Amino acid sequence: MKSVLIVDDDRVILNLLAEGLRDSGYDVSIAVSGEEALKLVDCRDFDLVVLDMRMPVMSGIELARKFASVGRPPFVFLSAFDDASVVREAADVGAMGYLIKPVDVPQLVPFIEASIARARDIEALRNARDHLEKALTLEQNTRTAVGIIMVRKGLDRKPAFNYLRTRARSQRRKIGDVAEEFIASLEDNNRILCDEK
């Protein structure tokens, strides 16, 4: 069951949407303020947060910025304001979508489904990017360590790589991790030598 948090200071709209979405099969939580929403988000994960744009004390945009700063949860706006600058501001802060009130639940469900799907796709891309960056860093560390071993031991590339690989195997570790540790230890030694001068 997908979990949705609705944040709106208008209790009538809040309760109508919450009841309709529950009837449509969603696990729905509600908050009447940004502060209440932050407490709920601290306690559990949501697939999507539906934010009102204008709320007292903390606006929807301010709340969205707090979510965006920590990278979770994904959010959309449901607002009575349709001017281009407000919509642009919502997009700039990272909203998955923007829908104009009044809206009924049959309109809201496909919007929520599309927004959740988009948020999941973005999360998958972020994870793939992070994995690729880590792999590239480990590859670069391996090349650097092999180069250092070539210079220090007077070896060609292949024997230097084999030396590093044998070391990794003997420790039952990945070669990239051993290379990273090898480079770090050399940097520490160089720092100590510089401090002694």
Image (cartoon, rainbow, N blue to C red):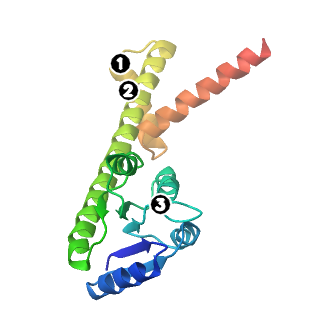
On screen, 8 above or below 146?
below
| Mark-to-mark CA distance, 3 and 1 | 57 Å
Q: Disc 3 marks which residue?
A: 60
Side (left or right) of 81 relative to 65: left
Element assignment for label 2: helix
Residue 157 in the image: state x and y as whole percent. Answer: 35, 18
Nearer-the-camera pick, 106 or 12: 12
Amino acid type shown at disc 2: Phe
State the residue position of label 2.
Answer: 161
- Determine the CA span between mark 2 and mark 1: 6 Å
Residue at screen point 40% across, 22% down = 160
Say which amino acid is labelled 3.
Answer: Gly
Residue at position x 29%, y 71% in the image: 102
**Where does the N terminus fall, quadrant-wise?**
bottom left
Q: Circles 2 and 1: CB distance less than 8 Å?
A: yes
Counting from the top left corner in percent of width and height, residue 179 is at 47, 32
Q: Residues within 10 Å of mark 1 (few under 14, many from 20)?
A: some
Image point 20% across, 78% down: which residue? 106
Residue at label 1? 157
Q: Nearer the viewer, residue 93 or 138?
A: 93
Q: Report the residue that reaches farthest toward the right.
A: 196
Number of residues whose C-alpha sits closer than 10 Å to that of mark 3, classed few (under 14), some (14–19) or many (20 or more): many
Relative to 59, say whether 191 is above or below.
above
Which element type, helix, strand or loop, lies under badge 1?
helix
